[in-house]
Image (cartoon, rainbow, N blue to C red):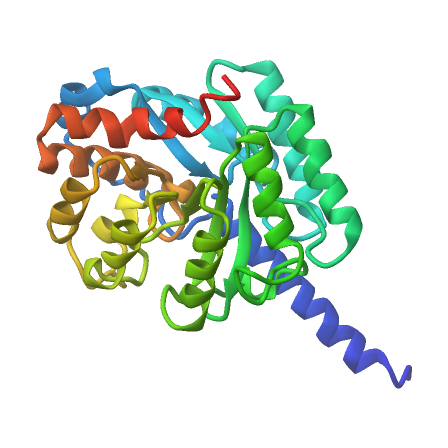
Amino acid sequence: MNPHLPSIILRSMLITSIFSLFLIACGSGSGGDDKKFSPNMQIVEKWKHLKMIDIHNHDACCDKAYQRYKQLFDTYYIDKIVLFGDISEPSAINTDEVAWNAYKDNPARIIPFFSGFEMYQPQGLDRVVANIKKGYFGVGETVAASTNSPVASVVAWKAQHPMDGNLPQIYKICADYDVPILLHIDPLSGFSIEKLEEALKAFPTTKFILGHVNAYNSPANLVHLPATYSNLYLDFLPGFTRYNPDSAYSLKDWIPLIKQYPDRFMLSTDSGYGVGHEEALFAMYELIDLINDEAIAKKIARENFLNLIKAKL
C-alpha cells in the first residue's frame, strides 16, 4: 500500500470540498432557488422603470451561469450585471475571461470586473494593469481579509488584511485609471476594518466598494465608515437580510442608514448566495418599496454605480 495514500485522499477530499463551496458561491446550488417561491410581482412592476443594476454577481463561473439565468434577469428587469466568477485564486483568471467574453457578446447588459491576480508576486500588478487597459470596468471581488467565510478564507490569493501584499499598489493603480475596487472583508470589525480605514485614508482618490456590508453586520457597526470616508461605497445585499435565517436584522432596520447616505449605497444579489437567485432579485425590489422614495431609489438602484464607472462608459 502506498504510504502516502491517506494524505493523498485527504487532499483530494479537501479539493473537492473547496470546489463544491465555489459552486455554491457563484450561484450553482446557492442554498436557495426555491421553485415554490411566490413573489409579489406587483412590487417589481411598480419599480421596473428604475432599470436596476446588480453590482455583485458571480455568474461568470459554473458553466456560464449568467446564461442560464437570463430569463430570470429579464423577468426582474435587471438592466446591467457586474459580472465576475471565482475570486482571488488562479481559477479566477479563467472566469475573468468568461466575464470579458460575456461583455463582448452583450455590452449593453454585462459590466465585467476581474479578480484573478497574484496577491504577493510582482506579476500580479502587471496583470491588474493589463486587465484595466484591456477594458475591464473594475477590480474585484477581491478578498482583502477573511477568517469566517468557508469560501473566501481558503482562496490562494487572498490578502491577510486590506493593506497587505499588492493591495496598496493596486489601490493606486485604481485611482490612476479611475476604476473602483470591490473588496470582500470578513468579519466587518476589528483589525481588518482598522486596516481598511488605513487604506481609505492613504488612498483618498481610490473608489472603494465594501462588499455585502449587511451580511453578519449591524447598521450601528457600519455607520461611522460612510460618515468619515467619502471614497467608500457600500454594496448592500437585500437578499441576505430578507431571506437568510442567519440575519439578525430586517430590511427596515437598514433604511435609516440608507436614507442618511443615499449616494453611497448600491444593490446586489451575490448570485443568490445562501438564499437563491430569485429571492435575491426580489429582495432588491422589496427594499426599494420599503424606502418608497423615488430619488433615493434611482440612486441606489442605478445612478450611484454608474457614477463610479462613468470614466469607462
Whether residue 183 is visible? yes
Q: Is residue 86 visible?
A: no
Residue 223 place in picture, x, y as percent: 23, 56
Residue 35 in picture, x, y percent from top left: 31, 39
* In the displayed structure image, the side of residue 194 where residue 35 appears, left or right: left
Camera-side residue: 244 or 171? Answer: 171
Return the residue found at the far right.
2
Q: On the rendered image, what quadrant is the N terminus found in?
A: bottom right
Residue 29 or residue 266, whichever sits in front: 266
Q: Nearer the viewer, residue 46 or 137?
A: 137
Q: Which residue does the image show at 39% across and 43% down from the upper left?
A: 231
Is 302 rendered above or below residue 211?
above
- In this rendering, the answer to whether 227 lies above or below 57 is below
Residue at 49% in and 17% down = 313
Reply above or below: 108 against 86. above
Question: In the visual, does 86 lie left or right of 38?
Answer: right
Task: Using the image, determine if residue 189 lies above or below residue 289.
Answer: below
How many marks do you count on the picture?
0
Position of residue 187 measured from the top left corner of the image (x, y, whole percent):
40, 67
